[in-house]
Amino acid sequence: MLVSAKEMLEKAKAGHYAVGQFNINNLEWTKAILQTAQECSSPVILGVSEGAGKYMCGYKTVVGMVNGMLEELNITVPVALHLDHGSYDGCMKCIEAGFSSVMFDGSHDPIEENVKKTTELVRITGEKGMSLEAEVGAIGGEEDGVVGTGECADPKECKAIADLGVTMLAAGIGNIHGKYPENWAGLSFETLDAIQQLTGEMPLVLHGGTGIPEDMIKKAISLGVAKINVNTECQLSFADATRKYIEAGKDLEGKGFDPRKLLAPGAEAIKATVKEKMELFGSVGKA
Ligand code: 13P
């Protein structure tokens, strides 16, 4: 059964480790991530962007697929199904479809608007026992066509949003989605520290988990980050393994590529990436 991310993140924050959010795009990715979480005895959060939700034929299809897998694969570790960077309407759709967690990304709205919509979602998700992630300070890079510049959040605004009763808070600290440019200034630990000082027990979320050096990840966890999102790295490892398989010409019998065989190396590559991240984040054995 899907669970809210609240308990796993509170445990992570108290235990000084982080739970990985891995974004899913299809059946193979979902299966690979769930199997790895089970093998690693780690809690896990499956992230679904609005674009990926559309691609997978809508949120109800995603809920049906994930719930089916939890049962058929005998998954016993805690799993949350979470909308990533949702609009207000997207959150409402996921709440109705049976997600166990949503992120409302009001970081592009004026803070008053962000507060208003987040307040409403705190009430609705609270009634359903779901977890809610809010965002302050746009995360840079591109996410489903939305481009941010990697700004640093205002710690006072973070406190205002945290006090509304959200479960977890994503705050921009110079992080960006996708690959980091050569001249990236690194994470602003000063900002992160100030945010944690003001928000206390609130589990903080680090977006843009691909390509952040290991020492920075560890430091971020020591400063209150309890959830780290990874997407691009899984995409890269999936694509690389698939390309190698095709280049090796494994359809030699002239029958064309068997889709199950074609996608298997990519799924294995995702498993390896997810395992590596779970080890780095310290969530192995914490289920
Ligand atoms: P990356 O694509 O940089 O790993 O970021 C993922 C993310 O933050 C999803 O919200």
Image: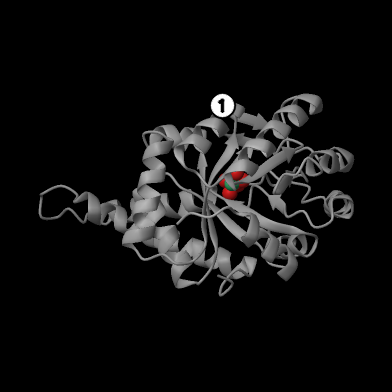
Give the total of numbered labels: 1
Residue drawn at 48 percent across, 54 percent down: 2
Q: Is 12 above or below relative to 123?
A: below
Q: Nearer the viewer, residue 135 or 143?
A: 135
Q: What residue type is labelled 1?
A: Asp
Q: Which residue is label 1 attached to?
A: 89
Q: Nearer the viewer, residue 86 or 70?
A: 70
In percent of width and height, residue 221 lies at 74, 62
Residue drawn at 54 percent across, 68 percent down: 42
Please identify the quarter of the rendering in which residue 276 is found.
Answer: bottom right
Q: Which of 272 and 164 is in front in this view?
A: 164
Please identify the quarter of the rendering in which residue 279 is found.
Answer: bottom right
User: Is any atom of residue 212 visible in this view?
Assistant: no
Please identify the quarter of the rendering in which residue 125 is found.
Answer: top right
In percent of width and height, residue 33 lies at 44, 59
Crowd around label 1: few <14 · some 14–19 · many ≥20 (10 Å): few
User: Is any atom of residue 235 visible in this view?
Assistant: yes
In percent of width and height, residue 230 lies at 57, 52
Q: Which residue lies furthest to the bottom in this view?
A: 285
Colouring method of the image = one colour
In percent of width and height, residue 266 lies at 37, 55
* SS category of the residue bearing label 1: helix
193 on left or right of 107: right
The answer as to whether callout 1 falls within 8 Å of ligand 1 is no
Residue drawn at 75 percent across, 24 percent down: 113
Check the picture and name the quadrant holding the N terminus: bottom left
75 on left or right of 258: right
Q: Is 278 above or below relative to 53?
A: below
Residue drawn at 66 percent across, 59 percent down: 9
